[in-house]
Image (cartoon, rainbow, N blue to C red):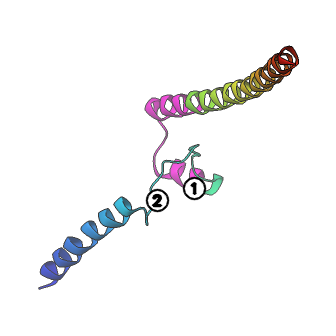
Amino acid sequence: MKRRSNSRLLAFVFPAAALLALTGCLSVRAPEEIHIGSDRQAAHEERRAPRGRAHAGAQSRLDDANAEIHRLRDELRKCEKSNHKLTEQRDRYKAKYEDEKNHDDD
């Protein structure tokens, strides 16, 4: 009987969560940065099992990915700044052109 109630609960929960996600009521996003636990958790993990080469490699790849995220954000800021400057320059030239066009019509 307990299995039947668990399966009924799961049969309700998964479609409900999917419906909420599709309608925008539930937001599921990946974190921008991934941090590996606190020092307390790290100490606990070290007592359970020693970290192997795979963990060190994964940590290295994670650090590289976070560095790439920061680099791309910096590049985006530079591009947005450049875009803003070019837009202002275009607007100045456009105003100058319109001013000269109106001056020639007179």
Check residue 5 in the rendering and tell me which mark sits there, or answer none. none
The relative height of residue 10 versus residue 57 in the rendered view (above or below) is below
The relative height of residue 37 versus residue 82 in the rendered view (above or below) is below
- Number of labels in the image equals 2
Residue 33 image position (x, y, % from top left): 59, 43
Residue 39 image position (x, y, % from top left): 65, 52
Residue 106 versus residue 39: which sits nearer the camera?
106
Three-letter code, disc 1 = Gln
The relative height of residue 3 versus residue 105 in the rendered view (above or below) is below
Q: How crowded is mark 1: few (under 14 residues within 10 Å), some or many (20 or more)?
A: few
Q: In the picture, residue 40 is in which quadrant?
A: bottom right
Q: Is residue 19 magenta?
A: no
The relative height of residue 106 versus residue 17 in the rendered view (above or below) is above
Residue drawn at x 63%, y 53% is 38
Q: Nearer the viewer, mark 1 or mark 2?
A: 2
Q: Residue furthest top?
A: 104
